[in-house]
Image (spheres, helix red, strand yellow):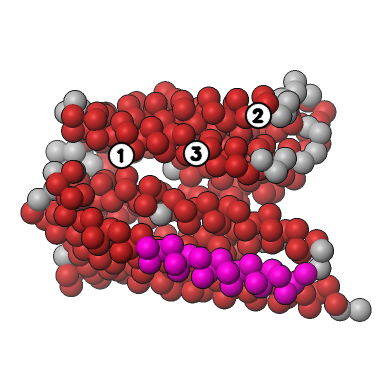
């Protein structure tokens, strides 16, 4: 939950940074981030109550308790990314997350398997990666001289605009966390091995499909610029080309996962139910993440065209109607594989609905622009 909240705040900071009150943006950002940290701590308590008596509490809560200690570093990461994008330093903004991702890829196997730390090793990697994110981002922001002392008057003046964007964005990014928690709950019925496979999938997904997150972040400003210029044909072209790139990227990653599923299973020491579930994920991931990518494109469109509530509704719809009933039905019919298949069906429905709504939104904006 905290990660989703912190990530979404960068959008609000990007808007605020386009004005002079960068220091005020920092204050508001840290206030919202403090709330996200509180949510993470409360999550550890709720998780212990939820999973009590099923043998996973000590492992899961032990890992969660490590992460909030550096959660505020996530505030600096999101802040730096938003500020760098605001001044057009997209490449530096990319390196903010790329540096931490490389640390994660290198340290995760060493600490989890090499040092035998398990979930604690994953938590330590998260802390080190978060610190790397923050250092790289802070360096980039200082290079552009974008830091200033906060002023109360400017903070209060900009707060309504920031919160109007930030609060729907926070809610939007919390939805996938709810879906992930429910998915873990359903898979826990099949034992710790199914949960282990799900953890590996969750760790692998951001690395394998990270390009889709980057794509949705990059098309938002392009849509906004062309909206300002009245080039609605280009806006539709951006969505069309974005969908094409999403398809090609998903197909390439899907092929790579299918071919590398054996070595990946050995790398993560998966066998039995865990290996079967992970192998099934490799076979269906391309299609599922293509439709997730379409939903990301729709989210970027709504957030940059002034309709953030639509992103919130779509994401919560997928996290509830598109995840819970299909996952339960799939579990009843086909076991652990059915859980993943059910979630994939939900992604298909909301991905298609999202991109169609985005195209429709552009059409409505064009109609309003030419209306007398």
How packed mark 1 is, by other alpha carbons closer than 10 Å (few <14, some 14-19, many 20 or more), is: some
Q: Could you say where residue 177 lies in the image, as x and y percent from the top left?
A: 41, 49
Are circles 3 and 2 on residues that touch, CB within 8 Å? Answer: no
Q: Is residue 9 above or below residue 356?
A: above
Residue in the picture at 58% in, 52% down: 217
Residue 205, placed above or below residue 135: below
Occupied quadrant, residue 53: top left
Q: Which residue corresponds to mark 3?
A: 97
Location of the N terminus (image quadrant): top left
**Label located before the other in sequence (3 or 2):** 3
Q: Name the residue furthest right.
A: 372
> Could you tell me what secondary structure mostly forms the magenta stretch?
helix
The local secondary structure at tag 2 comes to: helix
- Residue at 42% x, 60% y is 319
Q: Is residue 232 above or below residue 141?
A: below
Name the mark on residue 133: none
Residue placed under numbered mark 2 in the picture: 141
Q: Residue shown at 18%/43% (left/top)?
A: 267
Q: Is residue 338 left or right of residue 170?
A: left
Q: Which residue is mark 1?
A: 47
- Magenta segment includes 64: no
Q: Is residue 93 visible?
A: yes
Range of the magenta residues? 231-252
1 vs 3, front mark? 3
- Decide: marks 1, 3 in contact (CB < 8 A)? no
Q: Dot 3, crowdedness within 10 Å: few (<14), some or many (≥20)? A: many
């Amino acid at each position: 939950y905290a990660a989703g909240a912190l990530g979404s705040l960068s959008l609000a900071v990007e808007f605020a940074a386009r004005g002079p009150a960068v220091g005020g943006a920092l204050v508001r950002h840290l206030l919202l981030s403090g709330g996200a940290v509180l949510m993470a701590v409360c999550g550890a308590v709720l998780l212990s109550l939820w999973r009590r008596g099923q043998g996973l509490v000590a492992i899961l809560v032990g890992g969660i308790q490590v992460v909030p200690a550096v959660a505020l570093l996530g505030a600096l990461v999101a802040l730096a990314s938003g500020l760098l994008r605001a001044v057009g330093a997209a490449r530096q903004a990319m390196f903010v997350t790329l540096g931490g991702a490389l640390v994660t890829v290198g340290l995760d196997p060493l600490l989890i398997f090499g040092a035998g730390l398990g979930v604690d090793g994953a938590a330590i990697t998260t802390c080190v990666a978060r610190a790397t994110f923050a250092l790289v981002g802070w360096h980039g922001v200082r290079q552009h001289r974008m830091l200033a002392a906060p002023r109360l008057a400017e903070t209060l003046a900009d707060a309504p605009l920031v919160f109007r964007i930030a609060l729907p964005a926070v809610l939007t990014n919390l939805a996938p966390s709810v879906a992930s928690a429910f998915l873990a709950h359903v898979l826990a019925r099949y034992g710790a091995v199914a949960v282990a496979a799900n953890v590996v999938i969750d760790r692998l997904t951001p690395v394998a499909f990270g390009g889709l997150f980057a794509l949705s972040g990059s098309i938002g400003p392009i849509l906004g610029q062309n909206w300002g210029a009245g080039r609605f044909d280009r806006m539709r072209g951006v969505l069309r080309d974005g969908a094409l790139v999403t398809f090609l990227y998903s197909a390439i990653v899907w092929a790579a996962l299918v071919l590398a599923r054996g070595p990946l299973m050995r790398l993560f020491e998966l066998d039995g139910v865990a290996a079967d579930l992970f192998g099934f994920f490799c076979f269906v991931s391309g299609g599922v993440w293509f439709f997730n990518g379409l939903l990301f494109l729709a989210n970027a469109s709504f957030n940059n065209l002034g309709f953030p509530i639509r992103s919130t509704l779509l994401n919560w719809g997928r996290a509830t109607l598109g995840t819970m009933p299909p996952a339960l039905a799939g579990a009843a019919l086909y076991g652990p594989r059915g859980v993943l298949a059910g979630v994939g069906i939900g992604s298909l429905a909301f991905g298609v609905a999202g991109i169609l709504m985005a195209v429709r939104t552009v059409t409505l904006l064009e109609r309003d622009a030419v209306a007398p």
